[in-house]
Image (cartoon, helix red, strand yellow):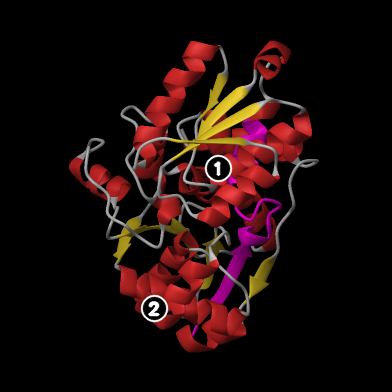
Amino acid sequence: MIAATAAAARAAAKRIAPLIEATPLVHSAAFSDELDADVWFKLENRQTTGSFKLRGASNRLLTLSGKQRASGCVAASSGNHGAAVACASQQLGIDCVVFVPEQTSPAKIAKIHSFGGEVRFFGTDGLDAEEHARAFAAEHGRFYVSPYNDEQVVAGQGTCGIEIIEALPRLNAAFVAVGGGGLVGGIGSVFKEHDAAILVYGCQPLASPVMARSIGAGEVLDMPSGVTLSDGTAGGIERGSVTFPLNRAVVDDWIIVDEAAIAGAMRRYMDCEGDVIEGAAGVAVAGLLERRSEIAGKNVVVVICGGNVSEETLQEVRRS
């Protein structure tokens, strides 16, 4: 499973190169000094659409047949995946409809529109939107692009890990925010194939720790999600998702952080690094800060998975 996913990621890296940015991996003097470690940030917030999601969406659409492309595609997303599918569709000339939960960030909706995607609202949870989008795609003969439950999407996300290992081959640990598990499944496979000793930490908000709780239970759980700054990782997981066994195989430990920790991590990062990040990235930074005692002297990467956040949310974070 790990080897196959890593191989698929290597193939995806060649395929999607014309459509994505190879994002920077930057060393943080401030975090390194504070934590007595070498801390690196992988800046997926600098990706074309402002998040890592463009990698998986591009890879999936590039693997479609000509007939599938001509029929159009459908996506469901809290925002970042929708923008990614819209962007890749625009570049490839594919008609695109994106379903989003009703509470989706206005900044992310605007991003989808900016890439020519048609936005439709459905439900209050990511899983609700996914199920509706799948039904809509089937009814209208379109291809449904899953945000995580697709091997080609996971392989595309894994290309982020390839860039990290090429720049930092002696990696010791990585902190990754987890929603549906496509990102950590893809890059975790790349890391583990490179060096099985690399520690992969899956980080989730206390308001929606669905993957962590599901792996703990040994099956995908149907559990409610609360409101969280990490809207990009909130929501349920499809039963039978390809990411469930993959996450179980590559994630060494799970870190659950509350809203105060997420907001504090976002403030700390933005103050130290001078860059805007969204709540999901704040979850990964919060995970790093929580495990400071475990990373001293190590080469550590935190994936800054996205930077699409509304000004209203930023003001809330700064006030908290």
Badge 1: how crowded within 10 Å, few (<14), some, or many (20+)? many
- Tag on residue 316? none
Residue ID at (36%, 54%): 252
Q: Position of residue 156 (x, y in %)?
A: 61, 39
User: Helix, strand, or loop for circle 2?
Assistant: helix
Residue ID at (35%, 34%): 128
Residue ID at (62%, 74%): 275
Q: Position of residue 300 (x, y in %)?
A: 52, 69
**Residue 153, located in which quarter of the rendered image?**
top right
**Residue 219, located in which quarter of the rendered image?**
top left
Name the one closer to the observer, 211 or 129.
129
**Residue 92, located in which quarter of the rendered image?**
top right
Name the one closer to the observer, 289 or 99.
99
Left or right: residue 204 versus residue 173 is: left
Residue that carries the numbered disc 1 in the rendered image:
81
User: Helix, strand, or loop for circle 1?
Assistant: helix
Q: Is residue 203 visible?
A: yes
Up-down: is 161 above or below 95?
A: below
> Disc 2 versus disc 1: distance between alpha carbons?
31 Å
Q: Is residue 265 visible?
A: no
Q: Position of residue 37 (x, y in %)?
A: 51, 80
Within the magenta stretch, is there residue 166?
Answer: no
Q: Identify the magenta region.
A: 36-60
Up-down: is 295 above or below 44?
A: below
The quarter of the image holding the C terminus is bottom left
Up-down: is 30 above or below 249?
A: below
Left or right: residue 209 versus residue 7 is: left
**Residue type at mark 1?**
His
Residue ID at (53%, 32%): 75
- Tag on residue 292? 2
Left or right: residue 101 versus residue 47 is: left
Q: Position of residue 223 (x, y in %)?
A: 21, 43
